[in-house]
Amino acid sequence: MKAVLAYSGGLDTSVCVKLLQEKYGCEVVTVTVDVGLAEEELREVEEKARSLGVAEHYTIDAKEEFARGYIFRAIKANASYEGYPLSTALARPLIAEKVVEVAKREGAEALAHGATGKGNDQFRFEAVFRTLAPDKKIIAPIRELNLTRTESIAYAREQGIAIPVDVEKPYSIDENLWGRSIEGGALEDPAFEPPEEIYEWTKLRRHEPELVEVEFERGVPVRLNRRELEPAELIAEANRIAGEHGVGRIDMIEDRILGLKARENYECPAAELLITAHRALEALVLTRRELAFKAQVEARWSELVYFGLWNEPLRFALDAFIDATQERVTGRVKARLHQGRCTVVGRESEYALYSVEAVSFDDKSIDQRSVEGMLRFHALQAEMFWRSLRRG
Ligand code: ARG
């Protein structure tokens, strides 16, 4: 049987190649979907796959597709699940889709992934596998063989697989353009303070405050400090700029799909900067009712995506609503980066629902007395309630 495996070059998926060959008797094709890796890293991943004796390896550059079709949607949706700006969750459906495409091209009968039976990624991979390729078999070796991380490391040693982790620092790291996640090992104790060494994107390198200007067109960032950039490049640049100020570090308890609470550490400087700026612009151009309703839509959107239901029709419908609100989200936001904080210090838009004259204490274009009739009715029902108490 031919199986196509989503391959990252990490411990679990490398172990999966061998397990699929040895225990499942499969011919293995590996697919590495580039959602934001360095070229050198990609070459190493490919070499590693080939050294494991795969029948074929595919490296698929999906950076622009990820940035435009997924990250930009996440920005428009201010996507966040319990305070985690969806990054791993956002990339999984795209990776799964590419695996399905390769499987169809290769005429493979099986789709495989290296997720465990405790996490979220199994749901995300398999939801896409089932929606796009219902006839293919799904193999999840780590889960099916009930392997622990220590057992995986031991099996890797046995098979002579080079492993990037060791037993003292067995972190499980997932990285893409939109964020970096670190879990496992000593971090599994929620009381344990993460050592500085787990962080790579948010090292404090600049100690003076820095201003950065983000320009949006219809809800998506198009210029950074007045420089027009392609989506993937813009996000990489935002990560660099905000990361040097230590912006976007998250240490949280997260409710996984299964209900398990997990300790999660994230680095997401670009997400922190771009979503903060995006929200600030929305606050200027959307009505209070649009904002309030959109907040509910955002929560539902984020939950769907976290749960791996990217292909659920409700997601398309919510995106249609979100897109409708973004028509006017065009303008510029200035943010100040300093000591891990990103603070909005200015915003402007041709669609601003803002009038200095109307709000200023120094202007007479609104006659203050015209509000008096409204005041009489403002607390009408409360007035009646208090009157009834005095009667009773
Ligand atoms: N908890 C996050 C999510 O479910 C990130 C998981 C990333 N995986 C990892 N091995 N670090 O989206």
Image: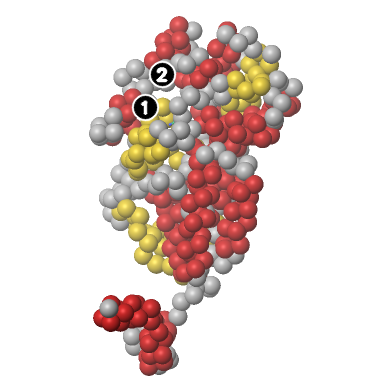
Q: Are marks 1 and 2 in contact (CB under 8 Å)?
A: yes
Residue 168, given in percent of the width and then of the height, sits at: 31, 19
| Alpha carbons under labels 1 and 2: distance apart | 9 Å
| SS for dot 2 | helix
Determine crowd level at label 1: few under 14, some 14-19, many 20+ residues with C-alpha closer than 10 A. Answer: some
The quarter of the picture showing ligand 1: top left
Q: Quick one: quadrant of the N terminus?
A: top right
**Within the image, what quadrant is residue 173 found in?**
top left
The answer to whether residue 138 is above or below residue 276 is: above
| 1 or 2: tag closer to the N-terminus | 2
Which residue is disc 1 drawn over? 184
Q: Quick one: quadrant of the C terminus?
A: bottom left
Which residue is disc 2 drawn over? 149
Relative to 26, 381 lies left or right: left
Residue 285, given in percent of the width and then of the height, sits at: 50, 69
Under 8 Å from ligand 1: the CB of mark 1? yes
